[in-house]
Amino acid sequence: MFDVESIFSRTLEKVFVVAEIGINHNGSFDKLIKLIEMAKKSGADAVKFQIFSEEGFYIDRRYIPSQYLSVYPDELFKKLYLPFKAYEEAFKFAESIDILPFATPLDLESLNFLIRMNVKLFKVASSDINYVPLIAEIKKTKKPVILSTGFSRITEIDNCKRFFGNYPLILMYCVSKYPSKPEDFSLNEFKKFLKKYKYVGFSDHTKTLSLPVAFVALGARVIEKHITLDENDDSPDNPVSITPEKFTQMVSMIREVETSLKTIKKSFPDKLVQILSKRSFVARRDIKKGTIISEEDIEAKRPAIFRKSNFRNYNEIIDKVAKKDISKGEPL
């Protein structure tokens, strides 16, 4: 199972790839288990859930002004509710197939459940960067935290980071649009984000596979991407989710880039391949003895087993006097 502490190592050995199941289980325990299974097969290091208590995390709608009621999502989340017992079984199943389970608690009761489960780390949602009662309790656990920043400006991020102090914290560069488009993100801004906060990742809400790979190339230590069994079903997060097949492809691309990032310098072909591929200087036409050799007199052809074609040899040939007759095509 993935070693969470390795995310904070000086030289990162492996990017932490998280399959965000979120609420794509649609309130079905069987679907939740299937998603965990497919995440494992797709090469993810971890699965993440969004957990909330039966009471919910929205204010009772009787207190909500009427202009908000038509878009108030409390009823939707009631349909997506799974009891803690279901998540307890899901955690056990994930661990049995060697994939790390963790979750975003959306209320204090859910956090207490995760603490009882002795989870390895916590996730704080972008919208909850100022959910101080939750964050204060998480800090007491002294366990690593992944914190998304999609709703937050730098001042809010700095305030939260200051509250955590030297706590093991990963800040996720994120755009909280569902779905997001590539043009919503700034790789140049991420470079500054990385320089400022060091331990950072990327939480993706696009359908594309290229952006997570690009963020890894720039230094992201964690990649979070939503996974779904079928992009055409009615799972709530489908607009920001990809299938296991696409997830597998993304992980493969990340691992390729990861390997390249570990390589100190590029490899060169074998010596024989270089000799057969490079060139030697030859006469472009017949050259008589005593002729001053010009640019029009020379060409270069493979292989490089005579006077090699390079700038030093070129300067030694041009404007020099031919010491013998040289036939067209003959090496110089």
Image (cartoon, rainbow, N blue to C red):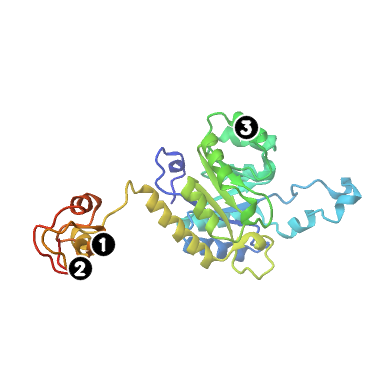
The mark nearer the N terminus, 1 or 2, is 2
Query: For the point 88% across and 48% down, which residue is it?
Result: 62
Q: Which residue is drawn at 53% across and 29% down?
A: 166
Q: Which amino acid does label 1 sit on?
A: Glu
What residue sits right under mark 1 in the picture?
A: 296
Check disc 2 and report its element: helix, strand or loop. Answer: loop
The image quarter containing residue 180 is bottom right
SS at mark 3? helix
Q: Marks 2 and 1: in contact by CB < 8 Å?
A: yes
Q: Is residue 69 above or below residue 300?
A: above
Q: Measure the alpha-carbon separation of dots 3 and 1.
A: 67 Å
User: Which mark lies nearer to you, 3 or 1?
Assistant: 1
Asked if residue 97 can be seen in this view, the reply is no
Of the two numbered discs 3 and 1 on the same chain, state the one appearing first in sequence: 3
Q: Quadrant of residue 26?
A: bottom right
Residue placed under numbered mark 3 in the picture:
158
Which is closer to the viewer, label 2 or label 3? 2
- Residue 146's place in the image compared with 210, above or below, is above
Res 95 visible: yes
10 Å crowding of disc 3: few (<14), some (14-19), many (20+) = few
Q: Write the residue at 81% across / 53% down.
A: 72
Q: Disc 3 residue type?
A: Asp
Where is residue 58 drawn, in percent x and y?
78, 47
Sequence-first disc among 2 and 3: 3
Q: Toward which corner of the image does residue 281 lie, by quadrant?
A: bottom left
